[in-house]
Amino acid sequence: MRIAITAMAMAATMTATMAGAAHAAPVEHPQADSQALDLAEKAIALRSVIGPGNQTPQVATLYKAALVAGGFSDQNITITPVDDTAYLIARWPGSDPSLKPLVISGHMDVVEAKPSDWQRDPFKPVVENGYLFGRGATDMKLDGTLAIAALNELRREGYKPRRDIIIEFSGDEETTMKTSAIIAGKLSNADLVLNIDGGGGVLDEHTGKPDYFTWKGAEKSYADFEMTVTNPGGHSSEPRAENAIDQLAAALLRIQHYQFKPELNDLTRSYFLNAAKWEPGKIGIAMRAFAANPADRKAIATLTADPSMIGKIGTTCVVTMINGGHALNALPQRATANINCRIFPGHPRAAIMAELEKVAADPNVHFADVTTGSVATDASPMRQDLISAVDKAMNETYPGVPVFPSMSSGASDSMWFRNAHVPSYGVSALFIKESENFSHGLNERTPIAGIPLAIDYYLSLFTSLSH
């Protein structure tokens, strides 16, 4: 595609700025760089959203064709339909069958996006002003195609892995995670999982240069709780003291103003202490203070006010959907709301729901756990081989950029591997400004300048852990 060639030329000129002070010029991989962007554009154009017209199977077909063209055997790639979606597993056999495989994990589906809300059609990819725009540009079609392009590049260079390399893509990570659980069960004999849908680098808000890189060793648990209020209703001309919508709204406001106890673990403490060096002013001060004392009220207030930080200091719950009433001229007989929680490791869902019930403080508000596609898991171990491989890959591509672990505020396929006792780590190669991370939001975009360096990073990481 002509746009891909133009964009990659732009990316090449920007690479030196992003890398900062560098070693000798790295080997260039123009074919892989171009393929990653071209394939990402094609994938974004496929509306891989749950429901009628779900094109996730077409994304799987696109990815399989690219892997076969790159040297994967057609017999070693399977696409398995599940409901309206599908998942893909591709195996590159290693020379030593006694070794457990290395798994590279991602997903093909994306969150729904309404074109009328966006500045550009979310399913018509655009490369403009150094950014790739479209649903999935950040979460996570570009990361997926970067991994595919890197594996194809390794084959072109004649690399021979000792252990099997398996790349897999789930088809419903953003919703039920049914395929995610299936894949983890099939690959439960893996040595470790590199989840390319987590981790990543942070760019300075003003200079655009890399500040630091984090890999993810744990994540918060996902939960949905349904709140329901019912009463007899009646004629709207005869208001009653008890109104289902009013009662639900009052309970929601009490939950809105409630904060779960802030807390730390080893991963988040490491993150706060290290990342604070690049956070200006009061945010950096608050991060260091919180790492020293998670009960520091001033630090908690500062971090809670920052959307990029609040999810890192403990459990969060927020209303995401509401529904109520049945007619414009009738008192509501029923009102419901969904509370979505991201639970800090170590707390069962039942305990969080009980806490919410206490906060709602109304026996007429009934709670139900309606969570699907989620399990609570402990952190993956701090494996030295993984740490060394990530450090090496980053030092080769972004010399001098600090690397440290952290915990993801969101949920990913990693939970299913950890549930199957397979360590999984978020290792996405892309760098982005925190203010420009629009995953799940409007006008999603990712800077393309990092594509050549991301390819180099994956080439190093994949070989280090599969040799």
Image (cartoon, helix red, strand yellow):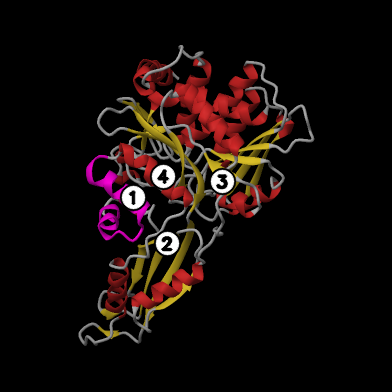
| Dot 1 and dot 3 residues touching (CB under 8 Å) | no
Q: Indicate which label's residue lies in the foreground, 2 or 1.
A: 1
Q: Nearer the viewer, residue 393 or 12?
A: 393
Give x and y (percent) for residue 386. 58, 36
Residue 141, above or below 409: above
Report the residue marked by disc 1: 309
Report the residue marked by disc 4: 271
Q: Indicate which label's residue lies in the foreground, 4 or 3.
A: 4
Give the secondary structure at mark 2: strand
- Give the mark, 4 or 1, whose residue is nearer the N terminus: 4
| Dot 4 and dot 1 residues touching (CB under 8 Å) | no
Residue 48 lies left or right of residue 255; in this view the side is right
Give x and y (percent) for residue 221. 49, 58
- Give the mark, 2 or 4, whose residue is nearer the N terminus: 4
Crowd band around label 1 with a 10 angstrom C-alpha radius: few (<14), some (14–19), many (20+): some
Q: Based on the displayed image, in which of its 4 quarters is residue 313 positioned?
A: bottom left
| Residue 301 on the magenta span | yes
Where are the magenta residues, as a range? Answer: 280-304
Q: How far separated are the C-alphas under marks 3 and 2?
A: 23 Å
